Amino acid sequence: MSKTTPFPITLLCGLALLFAGCQGEAPPPLASRAVLVQAVAPLAVGTATYTGEIRARHELDLAFRVGGKLAARLVDAGAEIKPGQPLARLDPADLELAATAARAQLAGAESDLATASAERERYAGLLAKKFVSQAAFEAKDNAANSARARLEQARSQSRISGNQAAYGTLSSEFPAVVTAVLADAGQVVSAGQAVFRLARPEEKEVAIAVAESRIAELKAAKALSVGLWANPEVRLRGELRELSPAADPATRTYAARIRLLDPPPEVRLGMTARVFLDAAGEAALLVPLAAVVDQGNGPLVWVVAEGKANPRPIRLSRFQEDGAVVAAGLQAGELVVVAGAARLVVGQAVDARPVTPPAGQR
């Protein structure tokens, strides 16, 4: 009877120890990864900005009421004018001749009326003595009435010619600033052709162009503030006065006018200005567009805290040119990954390096 050789006890013990060692060994830690981070910033008041130009609320083209040759131009662009100040003059020769002719016609009409009235009075006396017929008297009476009507016509024409002679001098009825000169001395202009472009400086406003996607935002703004490019320290209050109902066919934007409330004297026409919108609604945060990741379960960002990166779901409000507006899920000051998030895993250690925000790159 053969005897089975027992399995070496020492080998069993070695295998048991080896198996136990494999079961209790921890996986190797993930290597630290370098990422760029940026602090979450609160959405500043007036983030939406529009660039425009200081304009006068009342602008108009000034023209002669009569045509003629422009004999003299008395002001240049940029001149501040007073009411009644002469701005330009037409050649007065033709206007004076027309006025002289009208006065001569008036004198002739007065003479004709005097003659017709004397004839009527004479025929009235003859009719009373039965020396002329009633028909003859009525003819003289009609002639006198016609002469009186022609006199009234001549008087009106004389007044018109006198006014036209005065229209040869162009002036403004109110204080204004000459913003453009559209005709010069020696040029023949027609009645109504613009010679100057004037702006009344008592009311100033900012002309801006608004994209169709921003119209609701502009209307809902709690307040508007205006800054001057030449003097950034000056901040003015404004209000929406006018919004065009139709888009410009070339730019597809809507023209808007922002009235300036109590502008200081240093605000001059033609200056460059910026309009800031104080948007209504709850406070929001701004993160770079590159920080927002969507892996199919909604938007999220990678937040770095205590040297480790972890994903954080967020709720977005909108996208704009300088970043994404976060309505919920983050707090101001938290660090979010803006570059290097593609290969991160939950809880991975990171070497966070701050990136310079766009405002500090200039």
Image (spheres, rainbow, N blue to C red):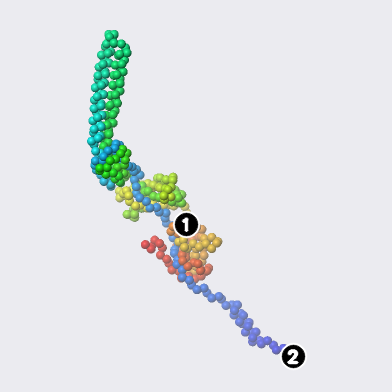
Q: Can you give x and y, in whole percent of width and height, for residue 152 in the image?
A: 29, 25
Q: Can you give x and y, in whole percent of width and height, for residue 65 in the image?
A: 30, 37
Disc 2 residue type?
Ser
Q: Nearer the viewer, mark 2 or mark 1?
A: 1
Residue 38, image quadrant = bottom left
Residue 168, image quadrant = top left
Q: Which residue is mark 1?
A: 319
Which element is circle 1 on?
strand
Most extreme residue toward the bottom is 1
Identity of the residue drawn at 28% across and 31% down:
160
Nearer to me, 276 or 256: 256
Crowding at dot 1, Cα within 10 Å, few <14 / some 14-19 / many 20+, comes out as some
Identity of the residue drawn at 28% across and 47% down:
78
Distance CA(mark 2)–CA(mark 1): 86 Å
Identity of the residue drawn at 34% across and 43% down:
58
Q: Taking the image as drawn, is residue 217 in sight?
A: no
On screen, residue 79 above or below 230: above
On screen, residue 190 above or below 112: below
Q: Taking the image as drawn, is residue 356 in sight?
A: yes
Which element is circle 2 on?
loop
Tell me, for residue 2, which label it has, or none: 2
Tell me, for residue 297, which label it has, or none: none
Mark before the other along the chain sequence, 2 or 1: 2
On screen, residue 4 above or below 183: below
Disc 1 residue type?
Phe
- What quarter of the picture does the C terminus occupy? bottom left
In this rendering, would 48 be left or right of 7? Answer: left
Crowding at dot 2, Cα within 10 Å, few <14 / some 14-19 / many 20+, comes out as few
Q: Can you give x and y, in whole percent of width and height, for residue 287 in the image?
A: 46, 61
In this rendering, would 45 be left or right of 329? Answer: left
